[in-house]
Amino acid sequence: MATASAISIPITAFDKTAGAFGSVTKGLGKVGLNVAKLGAAFATLGVAAGAAIVRSQMNTIDALGKTADKIGTTTEALGAMRYAASIAGVATTTLDMSLQRFVRRTSEASVSMGEARGAFRELGIDVQSFNKLPLEEQIGTIADKMGTLRSQTDRVRIAQKLFDSEGVAMVQMLADGSAGLKEMGEEAQALGILLDRADVAQVEAANDAFTRASAVIEGLIS
């Protein structure tokens, strides 16, 4: 089985990749991933398996930053919502898509357009004021308002107006109201799994460098 030290020989042999791999190391270090520990993991799991795990995590963090930017929220807020969703059994892809649709539908409703207008009226929300709140506060408000509805079928109906087809999953995530979401956010913070935008940017840069370095190596050995 190959070890981390064994794979360092061909890597360092390619001078062209030095800058790129330096960026990868720097990016990983910013989020607390120690290269020595990664080496031990590679030795235990095998180089390919260990590298795949690290790259998967890098891709997840990269997507966190891009999605947060896309929907106009912070990486910490989105990370906390992703954690709450995972505890509720809601997939990250489902949450991200539901939030994208929610942001669009909220904006549409604020100018008297779209399918969510009736849902906001039924929940007693002034959508113009609501649209100015940070996304995490909007979701907390929706969670509390959903708790006032008479039945689960009403919650599902309203959730589908707000979140589209992902609404059913969101009902599950919002079941404990804003207090439950806050508790999950505090738990995620205590676990140290929330990353700020600067840290995420480092991983994005490392991910880009990793892609460039891989392309250089493939070119040299092809």
Image: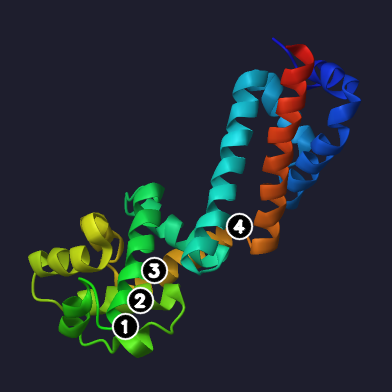
Real-space Cα separation, disc 3 to disc 2, in angstroms: 23 Å
Residue 131 position, x and y percent, is 38, 82
Badge 3 vs badge 1, beta-carbon distance below 8 Å: no
Q: Secondary structure at mark 1?
A: helix
Mark nearer the viewer, 2 or 4: 2
Real-space Cα separation, disc 3 to disc 1, in angstroms: 25 Å
The residue indicated by pointer 3 is 181
In the picture, measured across the screen, residue 25 lies left or right of residue 167, that is: right
Q: Secondary structure at mark 2?
A: helix
Closer to the camera, 86 or 163?
163
Q: Which mark is residue 110?
A: 1
Mark nearer the viewer, 1 or 4: 1
The residue indicated by pointer 2 is 107
Callout 2 amino acid = Ser
Q: Residue at x 41, y 49 (%)?
A: 92
Q: Quadrant of the N terminus?
A: top right
Q: Secondary structure at mark 4?
A: loop
Real-space Cα separation, disc 1 to disc 4, in angstroms: 36 Å
Mark nearer the viewer, 3 or 1: 1
